[in-house]
Image: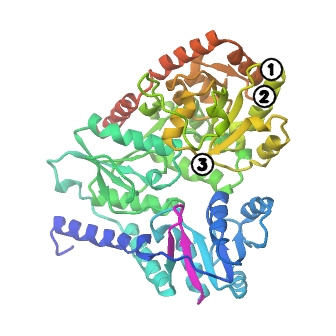
Amino acid sequence: MSAKMPLEELSSSKAHFYDLFESLTVKNFQVTKFPEFRKGLILGTGNINNIIFLTEVCRKSSNPNLTVVGGDHLISELSRKQFDSIEFIKYSEAGLFLWKSNPIWWEEVFKKNFDSIFFYINQNSLLGIQNILEILQFSQTKVEIYFIDEEKKLYQISQEDCEQALNSISKIDKFTDQESPNYLHLHKKRNARLLFDGRVLSENSRTGIHRYANELLKVLPSKISEIDIQIIGCQDSTIPEGVAKIPVSLPLSDHKRAEKIVGISSTLEQSDLIFSPYFPVPRKRKAKAILTIHDLIPLVHPEWFTNPSTINFFKNNLRESALHADKIIADSYCTKSDIIKFYEIEDEKIEVIHLAPSLIFKNTAEWNPPLGKTIPEIITKNRPYFLSVATLEPRKNLVRTIKAFELFREREKSLKPALILVGKSGWKNEELLETFHKSKYNDSIFFTGYLNNEDLISVYQHALAFIYPSLYEGFGLPVLEAMSSGVPVITSNNSSLAEIATDAALCCDPYSVEEIAVSMEKIAESQTLRQNLAALGIQRSNKFSWEKTAKETAKVLLSCLN
């Protein structure tokens, strides 16, 4: 029995726990000057885009020699990029980099006389890179150790820093593994408390899931005023007024550890509910838990994914979480059907709550911004264009989109519109680039990369039509963004897209280049059709709002609480 009173014990435990996380914050290790090095080793942690980014940053040093250590899929992808003067070392094991999996192999790597080591970090804490810290410590390397984030901020750590960080991580694990008392009885007269898992907000990539969490968090407090909302896992993110931030980092790829931390944090904060907009909820918890599942595409079409860990996450981590969650929210009836099929979860446990377009896309007479500086100059000269907004990956069906555009241009000789492809580079996009380079109309096809909101709004509103023949979606938010912008939409007749678009768009078979091309012809040839589809699209998009999404989400949360 502790000598402390329960409230004093709780306060002491929280302070100790949160101090451990503060010691692991990456800002403690930031430096300003990028090093000059002769022979650098890149530890290939993260996805292909992260490693390409890190490689390009490192190559800005004068006359660098670089070696990249990576798994099969990473080395295979990097090899296709044809980097000059970069050596590749294929990791000897499958999965995560681990010293203990093959220490002799790692020792041989570190014998190659590197003078600097680099790795990429996608979060603000060392907690998520324990495996890298262990490799650096056990190797007893004496070289300079640096890591870089997406904003090109540079950090440096020493062997002593690695040792201290691993000690703090060990204490966190010990704390989360112990059986904690239930503190809920200490404050009987208070509002109920909701712990919001904010990991998706800590990621730099502004995905649809990030937008979902952000928009929901803006409106939800007004819908559940009887519940105090606390958020965890996003210290550096801006959050709405009235939401309390818990000073705890959550690793993005170590789901088991993250679950334990969320579980113990919910106990320390006396949470009654845990809500996760994407990541698994903790099995070991004293609060009710609600999980949102946006799609199960890696299980429906595993052939589209190169990283085995992605499929493993959906097959194991997310499935286990779905089974023990108290309620599941699905973005669409299509996703609900997939959850029932792949996870064998009863219908009654799953609530369908649709997403919504942001208000920034509303087409009004007052807001019709000019095309921004990042838009290709040729289309600012009143040239009509078809628009696609999608990550450059196979599922988005951009190869067939380009082929359909070619077929359309062969038949249509007067309007001669362009095709603009907005979106960051994804994976398996070699065929897309090859199709583009071989196209006789590639001088009319433009890749813009990622666009900020201001340019995205304008590129939507100036488009002849929006084209989104995706092969599979869990929802399809860009379709509603386009409709909300007053733009005619061409989309697929499958998955959630037909459910969301209904008769307010031209729906076609995404596997048929001919059908996609014919849809483009119909749009180009008929101003009446364009006007009708634009009007229907606005009517359809008005049925979706974040107010409605938050209201329906609040209903699910309150039902669990009661």
Q: From the viewer's side, name the closer residue of 244 and 227.
A: 244
Please state which amino acid type lies under the numbered disc 1. Answer: Lys
Magenta-highlighted residues? 141-155
Give the label, 2 or 3, closer to the camera: 2
Residue at coordinates 23% horizontally, 54% vertically from top-left? 184
| Left or right placement of residue 265 versus residue 313 in this view | left
Residue at coordinates 47% horizontally, 28% vertically from top-left? 368
CA–CA distance between discs 1 and 2? 15 Å
Residue 154 in magenta stretch: yes
Disc number for residue 413: 1
Graded by Cα atoms within 10 Å as few (under 14), some (14 to 19) or many (20 or more), the crowding at tag 3 reads: many
Sequence-earlier tag: 3 or 1: 3
Query: Which quadrant would the N terminus be assigned to in this image?
Result: bottom left
Please state which amino acid type lies under the numbered disc 2. Answer: Ala
Sequence-earlier tag: 1 or 2: 2
Tally of numbered tags: 3
Q: Is residue 506 above or below residue 5?
A: above
Q: From the viewer's side, name the closer residue of 315 and 433.
A: 433
Provide the residue designation for mark 3.
314
Mark 2 lies on a secondary structure that is helix
Task: For the residues labelled 1 and 2, say whether their Cβ atoms are less than 8 Å apart.
Answer: no
Q: Quadrant of residue 264?
A: bottom left
| Left or right placement of residue 430 versus residue 132 in this view | right
Please state which amino acid type lies under the numbered disc 3. Answer: Phe
Sequence-earlier tag: 2 or 3: 3
Q: From the viewer's side, name the closer residue of 463 and 549.
A: 463
Residue 280 in magenta stretch: no
Provide the residue designation for mark 2.
404
Graded by Cα atoms within 10 Å as few (under 14), some (14 to 19) or many (20 or more), the crowding at tag 2 reads: many
CA–CA distance between discs 2 and 3? 33 Å
Mark 3 lies on a secondary structure that is helix
Report if residue 128 is visible in the image.
yes
